[in-house]
Structure formats: C-alpha cells, structure tokens
Amino acid sequence: MEGKGRPAILKEECTGCGACVEACPIGAIRMHDGLAQIDESCNLCGGCRDVCPSGAIRFPEEDREKQPAVAEHHHVWVFAEVRQGKLASVVPELLGAGRRLADQLGESLHAVVVTAPREEIYQQLFGYGADAVWQVEHELVFEGDEMARAAALCQLIRRERPAVVLFGATAMGRSLAPRIATRLKTGLTADCTGLEIDPETRLLRQIRPAFGGNIMAEILTKYRRPQMATVRPRVMKAPRFRPDSSGPIHHFVPAELDGGLTLEELVLEEVETVNLEDADIIVSGGRGLGDPRNFALLEELARLLGAAVGASRAAVDSGWIPYPHQVGQTGKTVAPKVYIAVGISGAIQHLVGMQSSDVIVAINKNPDAPIFKVATYGIVGDLFEVVPALIRQLKKMRGVT
Amino acid sequence: MHVVVCIKQVPEITEVSIDRRTNTLVREGVPSIINPFDMYAIEEGLRLKEAHGGTVSVISMGPPQVESSLKEAVAMGADRAVLLSDSRFAGADTLATAYTLAQGIRRLGQFDLVICGKQAIDGDTGQVGPGLAEELGIPHVTYVRRIRELGDGMLRVERMVEGGWELISTTLPALISVVKDINEPRLPSLKGIMRAKRTPVTVWGLEELGCDPQRVGLTGSATEVVRIWTPEPRESGELLQGDPEQQARQLVERLRGLGVI
C-alpha cells in the first residue's frame, strides 16, 4: 500500500507496459523507473485495474467500499439493446421510465449503444427521449461478445459515473447487468415493475415482485453507484415518438479488452409465434387440447389476433410443443395485454408465469378450474366449440372469409 | 474433469404465505426443495462426468438445513457436497452471494466448469451465476439448452435467446446457467441414497473461506429490502354466458371495447 486512499502497485508484477497510464481518465498515473506510480489525485475509479495485463494494481477493500462517492454520480442511463439491427422493443419503454427518473432528478437521460453505429438507431433513441447517446466502439463489442461488452461498459461507467443504469430483462440484459454490477461492486435489482426517485433522499426506489408475484418488495441501493436495475419488456409504457429530436453522440473507444465468448451463429425460429416476451397477445394451450395436432387450432386463432403461442408445462412435457413456448415457473414469465388460456387448468406453477397479464381470458370445460380465479373473462365450455366460434367471430370482424 | 454445480434450497412456492402482521414470509412448516432449475444443473454435471470422467462437486450457501438438499444431490450421483454456512452470511444479496460462492469454489481447488440453474424460483433474479463468473474471473454463458462440445480447454453451447438460439464457444474454465430444455433430471437411485447417508457434507464458515467480513451477508450487500407487502388480489372476473357462439361474440366485444384487439 503506497498511501492512504490510493491503489497499490505490486512491484514484482508491474511490467511497465504503460497501459494504466493510457487508461487513467484523470492523468494520475506516471511511469517512474519502469514502474507505474499513482499520485494523490487518484479518484479510485478502477480503470487502471481493468486494463492492467499482469494484475499488478490492487485496490484495498476498505477503499473500494468508499469508492463510489454517491453525490458525484449523475444522470440516468439506459442500455440500448439492438438485436439483428433493430432496437429491442424494451428500449423505448426503458427510455420512458428513464425520462421520468431523469426529470425527477433534474438530470439528463443517456442511451448506450454497443452494436455497430447506425444512424436510424440514434434517431430512435433521441425520438424516444434520450438527451445524449454513448456509442461504444470496439470490434469484439460489435461482434456480440458479452464479456467484452461488459468490460467496455464497466470502463465507461467508471469514467462517466451515472447515478442510475437501466437494462431490459432480456437474455442479453440479464447476462450483462449482473456481470457489470459485480465488477463495479454495486447493487442490481431484477425485473422491476416500478421505479421512482424518492424526492427527499434522491434514491432510486425499485419495486419488484418475488415468489412468483406472491409478494412485492421495495429495494434501495443506498451507498453504491450506479443504482442498477433490469425491467422486463412490456412492463413500462413507451413514450410517444418525436421524429425530429436529436442530440450529441459521444464515441467511446475502450482501452484494451479481453474477449471471452465467440458468437458463431444465431438461429432464429418462427419469431412471430414463439417470441412470448414481446407479444401483446398470447394464446396458450394446455392438457385440455388432448392432442398435439390441436395446437393448429390455437395457431389459427393466434394468427388472427397477431398473437404468440404459449403452452402449459403439461403440454410441453407431453412433447406437444417445444420448450421455448412454455409459460410458468420453469418456463417464461409473461405479462401481455391479453393472455388467453385454452384448456389450461391453472396450476400455481402456471399462474406465477402469467398472472400479471392485463386481461386474462380462460376457456375451460371445468368450472372449478383454478384458472377462473385469475380470469378477467371466463368461458366455461368445450374449447373445440368455443375456439372455432371465436375464430369465426374474428374473421367476421376482420372481413376475412 | 471437475464440474462444480451450484444449488439453492428454496421453499415450495405453492406453500408460501405472508404474516399479515409483520409482513414477512412465513417459512415455518413450508417444505423445502432444490430449486427446480438447479436439478437440470445437477443432471448436466452428472452427464458430463459420465461422458468425460472426473468428479462433480455440489455447493450451496445457506443455513444448516440446506444439508438435506446437498445430500439429495449426492444421492443423484454427485461426489462431493459443500455447504457454506455461517450466521454472518445471512441476508446476502446477489452480490454478496456471488462473492461467498466464489470463495467456496476457489477453496475446492481446480475446476473446469461451473453449472448453475437459470434462476431460483424464490428470488427469480438469475444474477448469481454471471456475478459468480465475474468473481471467479471466468467467462459465462446464460440460458444454455445444450452442450455441443466440451474438451481441450474449450466449450461450445447452444444458448436460448429471444426468438431463437445462439451457438457460442468459449474457453474453460467457464460458467454456464442452464434451462429446462437441456435434460431430464434423474431420480436418486437406492444405491445413491445409501451413499448419501455415508457421505458427510463439508461445512465451511467465514474463517475457513478466508472471506472479507465486509463482503458477506447483509454487510456485504449493496441492495437493501426496505419494505415487502402482498399485492392486491385480482378483481373477480366475469363469466360469459350463452352458447359457444354467443360467448365468443361477447368476448370479442369485450376485447374490442378495451381496445386490445
């Protein structure tokens, strides 16, 4: 330990490569006799530790605890996930939530992009409320290596010190966010359904369900920064798009990054029917369908409604439909505008995966099925009569014959 | 090949209730199970051992009663069971949990692969796996539905993502979290149950792990739960009457009225 409040250089490990000198955002590191030396102006941002190839920079634990000076963190950041060249549907929703938080704080809203630069993505980000965009630029990051993405985002967050960082609870967000939060030694709250700023403490109040929605909890990250949270798609409302908005685009070229993963291939399946997380309407089938072929009936209904097709565990375990369609405890948790449960009795393991849907429709021949307890509209009847009738009604409404 | 499987003991969710007076979870008398996703992690570890040889260690953090879940994993075929248990570990959030598990895994010695379930059914965060990988300084892949190749210091897996799957390769050691699609967990054999009875569970506390007391349990947690409550139950719904044609027409009218179709 060289001095109080400064990281130590391990003399045996330091090779004098100078990577830390480059990485230090405030010029607090110099080379002296072939060894790095850190002066008193060090703000313990940790950027040097991330780039040191020989692990020669040690942050004492007690200093790391104190590192994030809470008051020195400003602005709300949103991770702008782009999939196959398109902005993920959760991003406008996050920008809507982030805008509110930034306004409550009297600060600004920034979006961070880790995919290759694209003008139309920037336009969307500004149009949905971002004040500024951060574009991370690195080949590994563009190629989809999540380890490189996490490392680059850590560098940027340490340098810029946002107060709040929001991620979509997507496959990518739920992989990156915990990796980043752990490296930054800060708090991360998963699947928030409510986010607001406490006017007195200026802390981010994070509300989330636990135990399959049976309880709600309010969570605070009081002493570490940034305050990080993930939000599921469709939970927050996307703001109205304002086409002529614009703002500054900051480019960030990370210091040396170690790759971790190679994304060799992406295989897309029938996106319309299986992408349950993004669907406004889901039509789900259960044991009551009786036969895998009867899923064709649900698919027809789903096509008419522009819906995705879900299933209960019973239907998946019987091999009637593949696992990505499963809704419930060991499948996906969904909250569409409309959830239509067909021939699903409603075991608790299924209910925890869909009971936050806005409108629930249950079609079942057993009037005592537990699904009716959570249903907004219930139809007690034979699904093989009700679903075809529904299809006829919808065709009539749409003018399809 | 040394595979480490992380498991969590969770309450059976069908049995959870809330004490309305204190607003805390009533856990007494609630049966505990191995987190369902972790069953797939255990099974995958056992299959890798069967294919490549080596050992499977199973590790958990929690109170002493978690021993029963670890014994269950041994009965399925795990070679070694370790419980990280210390009153100072209590109240850990995912950050403190990842740190403590990492200390435990380091103490186990060299390893090739760490397997976790996708998430636990009580907290539902899925954060400990990636956090643990970060603490261990190894790469991670989430939502793995199939291991295609493992060996020569590398791993190739299929990962579930929105609307499809990715083929991802990485170097070992690594951490993966697995989904239900990956396998069908076996039941413990009679021989396994007998072996589990004879196999002691190793218990390590803060000192054995050389943990920094500032980084474990409530003290080491970055997040703080300040309030819990039960959500309002859903309002009771409307049963649509009439013959199927009438029921269908009413439903379409209602949904149109709400502007959702």
Image: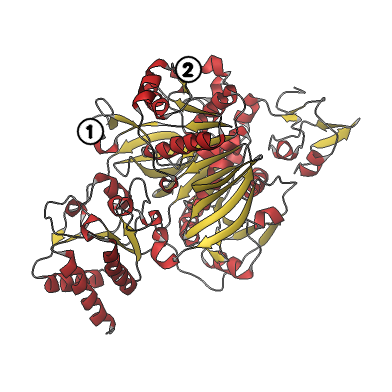
Q: Chain of mark 1?
A: B
- The image quarter in which residue A302 lies: bottom left
- Mark 1: which secondary structure? loop
Q: Nearer the viewer, mark 2 or mark 1?
A: 2
Chain on which label 2 sits: B
Q: Are marks 2 and 1 on the same chain?
A: yes
**Above/below status of B44 relative to A326:** above
- Examine the rendered structure and indicate whether residue B43 appears above or below residue B75: below
Q: Which numbered marker is on residue A35?
A: none
Q: Please tell me whether residue A353 is drawn above or below residue B74 in the rendered image.
A: below
| Residue type for callout 1 | Arg
Residue B68 percent across, percent down from the top left? 36, 23
Is tag 2's residue or tag 1's residue first in the polypeptide sequence? Answer: 1
Q: Where is residue A130 drawn, in percent x and y? A: 56, 61
Residue contact at pointers 2 and 1, CB within 8 angstroms: no
Q: Local crowd at mark 1 within 10 Å, few (<14), some, or many (≥20)?
A: few
Residue placed under numbered mark 2 in the picture? B202
Q: Quadrant of the N terminus of chain A?
A: top right
Quarter of image, res A390: bottom left
Residue A97 lies, with reference to residue B56, above or below; the image says: below
B139 left or right, relative to A386: right
Residue A222: tell me if it is visible: no
Residue B122 x/y as whole percent: 36, 37
Q: Dot 1 corresponds to which residue?
A: B20
Q: Is residue B131 visible?
A: yes
Three-letter residue code for mark 2: Thr
What is the secondary structure assignment of the residue under circle 2? strand
Quadrant including the C terminus of chain A:
bottom left
The extreme left residue here reads: B242
Residue drawn at x 62%, y 65% as measured from the top left: A247
How many angstroms separate mark 2 from mark 1 (CA)? 38 Å
